[in-house]
Each structure stands twice: as structure tokens, then as C-alpha cells.
Image (cartoon, rainbow, N blue to C red):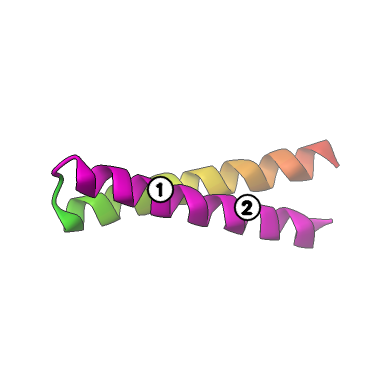
Amino acid sequence: MSTTAFILAFITGSISFIWLNVVFVRNGMGRGLAMFLSSTVGGLVSSAVYYVVIGLF
């Protein structure tokens, strides 16, 4: 089950990273800061999804 949780966490983390990066850059934020913030949030989202899926199953 942990493989499924890892795959789901990776996919949601990647999607949130890309989406947040696009949103931040479009709002005039610098690319470096946008990369840093979106990667931090993407990591948090993927960790949260991983532990939620592990907890549910």
C-alpha cells in the first residue's frame, strides 16, 4: 500500500508545485522565490497526502 501512497503523494506534490510556480510567476514574483515557495509547499502537500493515505489504509 505504501507504493500507492508514494505515487499519489508524488503526483499531487508535482501538480501543486507546477501550479503554484505558474501562479507565483504570473503575479510578478521573482523566479527564484517562486521556485523556493512552490517547492516547499509541494513538499508539504506530498507529505500530507502520503500520511493521509497511509493512515486511511
- Residue in the image at 62% along x and 52% along y: 9
Residue 1, image x, y percentages: 84, 56
What is the chief secondary structure element of the magenta stretch?
Answer: helix
Estimate how packed mark 2 is, as few (under 14), some (14 to 19) or many (20 or more) residues with alpha carbons within 10 Å: many
Residue 4, image x, y percentages: 77, 57
**How far, Cα to Cα, is label 2 from label 1?**
15 Å
Tell me if label 2 and label 1 are in contact, CB under 8 Å: no
Q: Which residue is mark 1?
A: 19
Does label 2 or label 1 sit earlier along the sequence?
Answer: 2
Residue type (three-letter) at the residue carrying disc 1: Trp
Residue 31, image x, y percentages: 18, 57
Q: Which residue is mark 2?
A: 9
> Left or right of 38: which side holds 5?
right
Q: Quadrant of the C terminus?
A: top right
Residue type (three-letter) at the residue carrying disc 2: Ala
> Left or right of 45: which side holds 6?
right
**The residue tagged with tag 2: helix, strand or loop?**
helix
- Residue in the image at 37% along x and 54% along y: 39
Q: Is residue 17 magenta?
A: yes
Estimate how packed mark 1 is, as few (under 14), some (14 to 19) or many (20 or more) residues with alpha carbons within 10 Å: few
Residue 32, image x, y percentages: 18, 58
- Residue in the image at 68% along x and 53% along y: 8
Q: Which residues are magenta?
A: 1-28
> Left or right of 3: which side holds 17?
left
**The residue tagged with tag 1: helix, strand or loop?**
helix
